[in-house]
Image (cartoon, coloured by chain):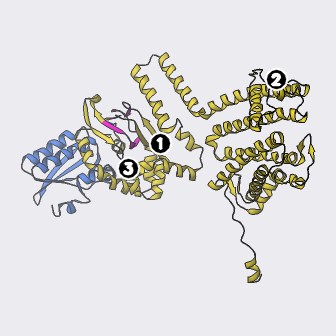
Chain colours: A yellow, B blue
Amino acid sequence: MSGAAAQAIPPPVPLIPERSTFRTAWDLVIVLAVVVTGLVVPFQIVFVREVDLGGSLLVYLLDVLFVADIFLNFRTTFRAGGSEVTESAAVVRRYRRSGFSADLLGVVPLDALFLMSSAAVAGVPVVLLLRTTRLLRLQRLLRAFRQWERLHSTNTGYLRISKLVIGVFLLIHWIACGWFLVAVVEGFPRDSWTVAAGIDGLDRGSQYLRSLYWGFVTTTTVGFGDIVPTRNAEYAFTILVMVLGASMYALIIGSIASLVSSIDAAKTAFWDRADGVSQYLRSRALPEPLQRQIRDYYEYIWERYRGSSTQQFLRDLPDPIRLEVVFHLTRELIEKVPLFRHAEPALRNALLMSLQPLVFVPGSFVVREGEVATGVYFVSSGKLTITMEGGARHLGGLEAGDYFGDLSLLLGERRTGSVQATTHSDVFFLSTGDFERLRGDYPEFRGVLKEVASTKSAKLEELVSAGCIL
Amino acid sequence: MKISHDEQDGVAVVRFEGNLDTNTAPEAQEALDDLIGAGTVKVLVDFSDLDYISSAGLRVLLATAKKLRGGGGNLRLCGLNETVAEVFEISGFSTIFAVFPSEAEALEGF
């Protein structure tokens, strides 16, 4: 290809990531535009009933937005099989198969062909009636919400409530328009409901408001009886709306109840479990301080971890991702405990992957004197106290960055001291098995421990001199 | 446990043979205290024939080191086997005590 020919070809428009802020913001604009379309088109047909400049400009401006949306949809990536698809041809194929046809029909300006025509049906210009094809855009709204629910899985409750509110409002708006349309189609006869309600001479806004009022009153089954049908067509429409309204009302109440409880399903499930435990403890007449301690533990777990079991969550992940997550979860530990700072990445990662997170509420024992050594403990946060002889002797404290349990393990002796949490404490535990495995797999582990041990020699000397082996 | 000692260049070299544990710790402490009481300020403990040391043995060493420091003296260790050396290194005792591979190296510059 010649240089000139190559220069003439414009560079391809870059693909837009599905998860990008721009795409989310654009989808929000489109959702608003769909809602406006859903409001404006029926309103123009029923209450305006003429082709005015303002209304037409608004409709065509919205058309421009939706045409732009079609172009953007052809250049937006999507996720398949757990990864993002960024091949242009695949993106085009997918959009063609999914929403393109409906989107295209929704922007074809059929009404523009009749702009110069004064043709009308039942007093409503054909131009306005042909604008109803734009209501096909409603499927775009549903697609946007489905997308958001998929990408933002933590907020699906709020999204579903939003979708419900929009759906209900649009439906009642259409019912209001339909109610007034009955009078329009019948040509506002003397016994029309509009005459009986005294709104036939009012401005458009007031007529719409009265119609909307009727829509709400009927669909919510309140039925004040101030605006009532007077003609057969009106009765038929009212029956239809009552059937629809009763179903919709039940659906709304049920959906809202379900959605509100699902927003915090995790919290509800967690506290249900905690309440179950409390009930069990009461039934077994456990001492009150112990019951409070357990309740305290659940409250701390909720505050700190939102009730999630880190171990369970990590088990479901593949190793590379688990390491990344563990790295993030233990960053405080890595910063504070010299052992992790001094270790080379391979050893550090092996250590981190072997750690088990533990939580201790104030007053609970991490280790007790007389226990066989089961592993080493690394303090990530909180304060602990060292005691001997059943608490009679206090031998100082431990805080974030300290670790203990290695001496009794190395000497093969039982612990002669206890460690008790004085505040809520997050501790990571390395079992004896893992400790020995790492010593065998990583010869440099000994050197790291030696280097780090120098930082705690003063405390070690004090404890061992006192006969305290942790 | 068998305890023996001699003097080399003004340094009391003490040798423990066997295990330095809860049972033998009092005997070891007494032997070391006797040396300090006799005016010795430099003590080298040779672990070449020691198989095992427990926390009780470590307390004996800590107490001895403290007493010697108080009198302006010093305690050195040498001849730790692989197991004992690893315990000292990993736990941090090799920072508290001056540890040497052999008696000759420990006596040098004492």
- Among numbered discs 2 and 3, the one appearing first in the sequence: 2
Foreground tag (2 vs 3): 2
Labels 1 and 3 positioned on one and the same chain: yes
Which chain does tag 1 point to?
A: A
Magenta highlight on residue A41: no
- Among numbered discs 2 and 1, the one appearing first in the sequence: 2
Helix, strand or loop at mark 2: loop
Residues packed near mark 2 inside 10 Å, few (<14), some (14 to 19) or many (20 plus):
some
Q: Nearer the viewer, residue B50 or A206?
A: A206
Residues packed near mark 1 inside 10 Å, few (<14), some (14 to 19) or many (20 plus):
some
- Label 2, on which residue? A228
- x, y percentage for residue A275? 52, 24
Which chain does tag 3 point to?
A: A
- x, y percentage for residue A218? 77, 25
What's under tag 3, amino acid-wise? Answer: Lys
Q: Nearer the viewer, residue A39 or A351?
A: A39
| The N terminus of chain A - image quarter | bottom right
Determine the CA span between mark 1 and mark 3.
17 Å
- Among numbered discs 1 and 3, the one appearing first in the sequence: 3
Find the residue positioned furthest to the front. A201
Disc number placed over residue A336 in the picture, else none: 3
- Label 1, on which residue? A356
Range shown magenta: A362-385
- x, y percentage for residue A76? 71, 57
Determine the CA span between mark 2 and mark 1.
69 Å
What's under tag 2, amino acid-wise? Answer: Val
Foreground tag (2 vs 1): 2
| The C terminus of chain A - image quarter | top left
Find the residue positioned furthest to the left. B39
Number of callouts: 3
